[in-house]
Structures are given as C-alpha cells and as structure tokens.
Image (cartoon, rainbow, N blue to C red):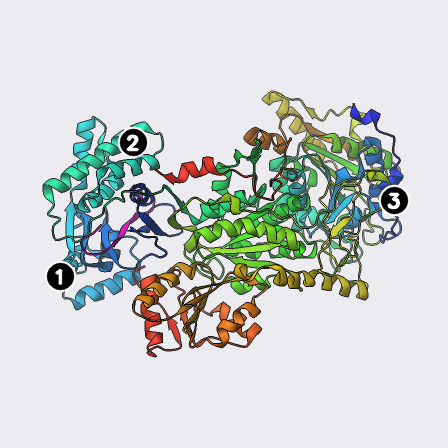
Amino acid sequence: MVKQSDELSWRVGGPQGSGVDTAAGIFQRACAIAGLHVFGRREYYSNIKGRHSYYDVRVAHYPLTSHREQVDLLVTFEPESLARHALAVVPGGAIVYNVRDADVPLEKITFLDARVRADLTAYLAEHELPATTAGVLEDARRRGVQVYPVPYNEITQQLAERLGVPKAIADRTLNTIAVSISAAMLDFPAEYVVRGMAHVFKGRQKIIDLNTEAIHLAYQYVHEHFDTEPFAFRLDAEKEHPPRLLLNGNQAVGLGKLAGGLTFQTYYPISPATDESVFLEAHSTFPLRNGQQGSVVIVQTEDELSAIAMASGAALTGARSATATSGPGFSLMVEALGWASMNEVPVVITLYMRGGPSTGMPTRTDQADLLFAIRAGHGDAPRIVLASGDLEEAFYDAAQAFNYAERYQMPVIHLVDKALASTTQTLEPFDLRRVHIERGLIAPPLSSPNGTGPYPRFEPSETGISSRVLVGTPGRIHWFTGAEHTELGRVTEDPVVRERMMEKRMRKLETAAREIPPEEKVRVYGDEHATFTIVSWGSTKGAILEALRRLAKKGVRARFVQVRLLWPFPADELRPYLEDADPLVVTELSYSAHIDALLRETTGIGADYYVLKYSGRPFAGEVLYTVFQRIHAGDAERRIVLHNPWE
Amino acid sequence: MAVATKPKVTPKIYKPEFPIDWCPGCGDFGIVNAIHQALARLNIPRHQVAVVGGIGCSGKAQYHVSTYGVHTLHGRPVPYATGIRLANPHLHVIVVSGDGDSMAIGAGHFVNAGRRNVNFTYLMFNNEVYGLTKGQAGPTLPLGLQTKSLPEPNMNAAVNPLMLALASGYTWIGRGYSYNIRHLVNLIVQAIEHPGSAFLDILQPCPTYNDLHTKEWFAGEDIGHGRLYDLQEEGYDPVIPQDADEDTVRAKLLRFIEKAQEWGDRIPIGVFLVNKNIDMYEERINRRVGNYFETPPAVRPLADENGITLTDLSPIFDEYLMT
C-alpha cells in the first residue's frame, strides 16, 4: 500500500471547535470504507473552543491495537499544530501547512503552553534556528521531512467563486480541504474521501455538495502544484473486505449495555463519560427480536449521588440499571455504592478513569482509580470490579456486567478510561448471539398478596445469595435499609444477626470467585510458556499486544497476563504465572502501580520492573516495545516512567 | 372505577406487627396512622406501594407501613423513589422525609425533583429539629429561636418549604398537621391521587426536643384560639386549570405566596396548589419512547427462551457500518 511502510500514521491538529474531529472523522471513514483497518486516538483539552486538540489516525491492511507517537503525515491549517507536532514527523514523512503560517513567532501562538514554548525554543536554539514556525519547518526539512505549503485561502476563494457561495461558507470546508490535500498526496482515491465526508454529514445534501467540490479542488491543487515523489507514503484501498463498524469506546460500552438488556440509565454530565449516555439517549429505541420495540429510559440527574441512587431504585424493581461516570463523580457516588452493597442491589457503574486527584485532567487518561474502585466506601462492602482492555471487550463486558450484578446481587464497577473512550477503531460487527442474559435468583409472585406476611429476602444461604424480590411483586413485601438488618430487611443491632448478615454478604464474593470461569478473570497473550511476564489490565492491552508482536519478531519470548476481573482478585489464577515470571513487569498508567499492590497483597509476589506513565497520555506500542527490549537485555532501571513532552 | 370492585380493606392490613421506637407522643405516630388510612381508603394493594424514607426519625416511618419499604440515605430518598417509580410506573411511591433530610442535606434533590414532576407523594415530617441526633436546629427552625437542646439561639434563618416547593415546580403543594389526622388523611389521599410530584409539608411537634412549637402551641393555648386554620374552609381555590392563561397563573401564584407567608397566630393548612398545567415526567418519557407504560424498564422482556438477548442492534450497526 505504501512505498516505505505497510502502514500509515496520520495526524491532524487544530483549535477545538475548528473541525479537527470532523477532519479525522472524514479521513477515518474514508479509510474504513476503503477496507483498511483504522485505529484513532483523540487528545483534547477540557475546553470548548480555541485550545489545541489533535487526532492520530493509524491505518493498515491488518488490525491495529495501538497508536504511534511518530507521525508519517501531519496535516495542519494553523500554526499551533505545526509548532507542536512537526518534531514528531519521521524522515520521509510530510507536513501540510497553511502557507500563511510559514513564519509565525512561537510567542504569538496564544495557547501554546509556556513549557512547550520554552522547550521548543531551546531545541531550535540548539539547532541554531529561530523560535518561529519557519525554524520548525527548517528543522523538519533538515531531518528529511517534506513540507507542503497550502494556500487554503485561495482554494476556498476559488470554491466560493465556483459555487457562487459567500467566502465565509466556503471557509467552513477548511478541514475537508486539509484532509483531501493529504489524501491526494497519498494517491488515495478521492472517491473514498467523498464517501467518508458524506457519512460524516449524513443527509445534509447542501453541505455534502459544497464539500464534494472542496475535495475535488484540493485534489486538483495537489496534482497541479505538489511534487509528491519525495514523500514516501502511498495508501491503497483493500479490494475485498467485509464492512466494519467504526466506533469509539463510549459507543462500544453503550452498545454493550443495550445488548445486555439495559433499560434504565442515569448520568450527570462529566468528561469523559457523558458521551456514552448521550449516545444511549440518541438510540433509546430499537427493535427486539420478538417483534416488540425495545427502549431504554435515560435520566440526566442533578448530581452523581442522585444518578447512582436513582439507578439503584430502578434496579430494585427489576430494571437492568446502570450509570456512567468518571473519578470525581464516582467519589460522590460512594455513599450510595455502600447502600447498594448493603441492600444487595444489582447496579452497574461504568467508571471512565481520567487523570486525578480532584479535578485532575478531565480529558486525559489514567488508571489510578483501581484501588479506589475496589475499596471505595466505609465498612466491608462487596462489589465486583472488572476492566476492559479494548473496544471489543468493552462491548461484551458492558453486557456481562449485568449478569455479574444480578447473579451476585451487588454493585458492579466496570472500569474503562479516557483512552478507551476516545479510541476509534474499525471492528467486525459484534455477535449478539454471544450475549447471554442471566438474571440470578428471583422470588416469583404469590397469588394472595394481602394475606401474606413479610418475605425473608435477605435470608442467609450457603452461597450467600438469596432470592431477590422485585419491588412490586405480589405477596413478597419486605424492607430495604442501609442499616444492618434482619432477613426481612428490618433494622437490627443484634451482634449475632450482624455477624450472620455480614458473612452472607461477603460470602457472595467467594461464590463469585468460585463460579466465574478463569478465562473471564485472566487472559494470557503471546508465548504462554515464556518467563518474561508482563502483567497489566485495562486499556494498556493494545499497546502491550503490539509490543509483544514486535518482540516476537525479534525472537524475544514474552507473555502478557491481562487481569480482567479486578475484584474479587484472581490470585489463584495469577499465581502460576507470577511464580515462574522472570522478570515480572508491571505496566500501568499510574504513579503508584496499583495492580502491584494487589499482587503483593494477595500472592506475596511483586514486580521486578515497573513501566509507568502518568502524563495523562496512553502508552504507544512502539514505545513499550523498546522499553521491554531494554528490560529483556537487563539494561533498565526498576522503575521506568515514560515521558513524551510533545503529546 | 376499578377501585369499587376490589374487596374493602381496613387500615390494619397496612400496619406491620413490629414495635415502634419513636418517643411517646411523637407526631410521627399521627402521620403513620394517616398513611394507613389513606392507603385503605384508596384500596391500594400492599405490593403496589413503595414507601421510601431518608435518615432520621422520619426515615423510620416506612418500617411502620406494611408495603415495600426502602430506608435509604440521609437526604437521598427522592432519587431512590424516582428510580423506583420511573422503572415501574404502576407503583405508588411515597417519600417520607424530615425537614433536615429534605431542606438541608437533600435540598438539591428536592429542588430537582420539582423540575421533573415524577408521580410520587412527598410527605415532609416538619418538626424543626434533628431529633435522632438529640435536637440540633433543623432548616425550618426560625432565626433566633432556641429550642431546649440548643446551647445558643439558632444562627440560621428558616427555609420556607412551601415557597421552595413552588419555586422548584411541585405541581401539588399542601400542608397538614400530624394531630389533625382526619384532615391529614384527606390531604394524603389527594396527594397520592395527584398525577405528578405532590409535596405535603406536615407540621409535627417533637415532644422531646422542640419545646417551642408544641402540641399546646399549635392548639393556641397561649392566645386563646387554635393557630391552624383550613384554607379550603376559607374558600381558597388552589387549582391552576389545564391550559390556564398567564394572568390566571400569575394570580394563583401571588395568592399562594401570600398564604405561604402566614405564620405565627394564624397558620394555614390544606391544599395550596394543584397545577394541572404541567404534565408528569412519565408522560414525557412515553412521548419519547412510545411504549413506556406497556413495557416500562422493570418489566421489559430481555432474553429469549435460550437466554440470548432479544436486543437487535442491526439498525444501530447500520449507522456505524462503513460501506
């Protein structure tokens, strides 16, 4: 597909609100429609308009699991993206930039962080270049990067004249033109760009017509003005291919919940969780296979406490009920999380981790909520915690979370993170025949409701599980309470009953640990018999898998142990891998390697090496590969913190 | 009416056989008796009722009603009640909550429930003190008053629950008195029958900690006449009819505000507002999803006979399929 490499790393950047997402959306769709595999990664500020955002789109003829930090083709239409990302472009790669941005002083770029400006200025000074975009471009040229100036203004002027529309209207196609310039440079057929664009602007024919013309003008400009021979990359369509879904993590979770029978979801707006609920609200009716209409009720609440309380109330009646939030919202939910544990309520909380503590970094990723998710709340309060490693897992796990919740009658926390939420990926359509619904023990209704006494809903049993009563069931009335209670749900402070009820609730964790099959707890990738052992969980999976593939190519034997069930912690399933690990490498997006604390606590075995990152940005496979290689060669310090000042 | 064909029930069936641990003479007894009588008068099957309480003495009320009872968290009965009702709109949901639960720690939920207008009945046990923690000032205790366990007079002004309910959007607002049970039963019946959020402020002596607004004070022993009077007996019409014009609505609201300010020697009880001009949240959901009342979240079928999901995502997949 390309001259130099079998894949392409493409990046577009710009101020938020200027169409960066639209540009990336067009390019990703164009590639996906052309049958290519796409992996997209979105980085953005907690801001509406003006701050810098960028989108990496990696495409290949084979499935991808990670982004790359290096860029083959950088597409910009304003100076900030040029300044921030030119250094990431590889020799043989190219930069597309606005001709009027050819010489902008870095100090004139409003939102360029002081630290970036200082580091970039120092770098340029070292290379005896001025602190301007001209310096940045010259540095790129010296490194063998092709640079292509585009007179965007002239092209939109031409567009306005050709279609007889105001210039301001034509200017709105800037992002489409930028994408098209890059696609034309790749000799990628314009037809796909048009189709990708039409998919983004669904049915808005006037806009589609305008942008179609813009695409053709951009292609024409490249053919007439650019010598693309020195630019080493080309992109071909795949001839035969099945149609694939292009989804992000929020959508994958939302779809998984619908598949799993979600009927009630609550939320309070918070980045990066909100998009899931908004997606669900936009898809709140859908067909059922029995000919009926399916629907889901979405409630935007006044705060996260209300969100989990409302979802819990709904769950009491039998609804499959969930909420979605991020760290600060989850902190607020803790009070009602305990209530759900105490009252054995099957409620699902999707927790999109982001940089903490406090407000932290709302739009950047992190895995440092793991111990909090497991321990949150006062008292001994059982819950199940599971974590998804990629979008496909996120779909099936979101459905499975309800089965865990209803089988074991406790809250389930489904951990995902900002990185997964804003990853876009081509995927084979999910298989709904794989989605089983298991509702656990439920007491049936009685026929003479008024004559019966209260029902012992919380009666202790060997497994700890007792029949749940859906509020509204005839003949089964009883009480619920956050206070310690009898089997009828009435307050008690009796020491013996207290012990019995505590044991009942906590025993369900043992039951869950016994019943949940090993493959749902832990998965091993790579060479299962290798001793070089990487332990991780959650969204780091994709980057680790890429690193494993590269290691294998170099003849390095390694295995990756992915922990999927985080609580109850699968110590027994992990122990064999930990015992013969040499070395044991824990990889996590956090400062303090939460999973290592759990390994040590439950097995007594801890990591030999830590590979960590807490800048708020995800791991890239190529970077982990070099780190694992260093560890393998015995050439690494025990604690390796990964940095990339330009992300 | 379906109600007429059901066998008649007595309040007794709503009364569980468990001891009650409120202080002797507590106003809560009157309220719970009124709930039993109201449910019996409406002849609602026990399993179709969920009584949802917060924390405090008021929050124990659901233990003394023989229906589904949900004892939640301090200040949070409203979101739990909302979840129960929205998931199963065939249930009658009654919130029992104190003034601290409602107007202090749960004030945010109180206000936002008014914006939604979900069909539930909100009974606020208003005794002006935090009884269970031994008599601290509640949010309805007026500024400068000193009930017996306060070391100093109250530093905070009181919130007016009726005004807050009005501002929040409750579509039925009333006030009752825990020792006028007949009147209270009538109010609770109307509140339950109202299709929307009905807020009933129930004045209630705390014989242990509120030595100012006592049974004797409400009876007006100090001034020679009872302090409470019935709005309806004085001809106050609380109804804002459906499709009322702006002038009618404004006139009603001004009258409401006037009445809600009365306190001291003459305190109105009765129905302050019945706003028929605003639909309930459940109707709004139904307009969005179409079949909400037939298959609400609690009962929608999920799986086929083999336990495989019934959800068909193909129309959504089509939207995201790259062709």
**Residue A371 sits in quarter:** bottom right
- Distance, label 1 to label 2, CA atoms, is 40 Å
> Label 2's element?
helix
The picture places residue A521, in percent across and down from the top left corner, at 54, 61
**1 vs 3, front mark:** 1
Q: Image point 86% across, 53% down: which residue?
A: B23
Residue carrying label 2 = A208
| Residue at x 12% of width, y 53% of height | A230
Q: In this view, does A276 lie above or below A512?
A: above
Disc 2 residue type? Ile
The region drawn magenta spans A1-19
Upstream in the sequence, badge 1 or badge 2?
A: 1
Element carrying mark 3: helix
Q: Identify the amino acid type marked 1.
A: Arg
Q: B10 or A292, which is in the foreground?
A: A292
Disc 1 is placed on an element classified as helix
Alpha carbon of mark 3 to alpha carbon of mark 2: how far? 77 Å
Q: Nearest the camera: A314 or A114?
A: A314
Count of marks overlaid on the render: 3
Q: Which chain carries label 3?
A: B
Left or right: where A500 falls relative to B156: right
Q: Which mark is residue A142?
A: 1
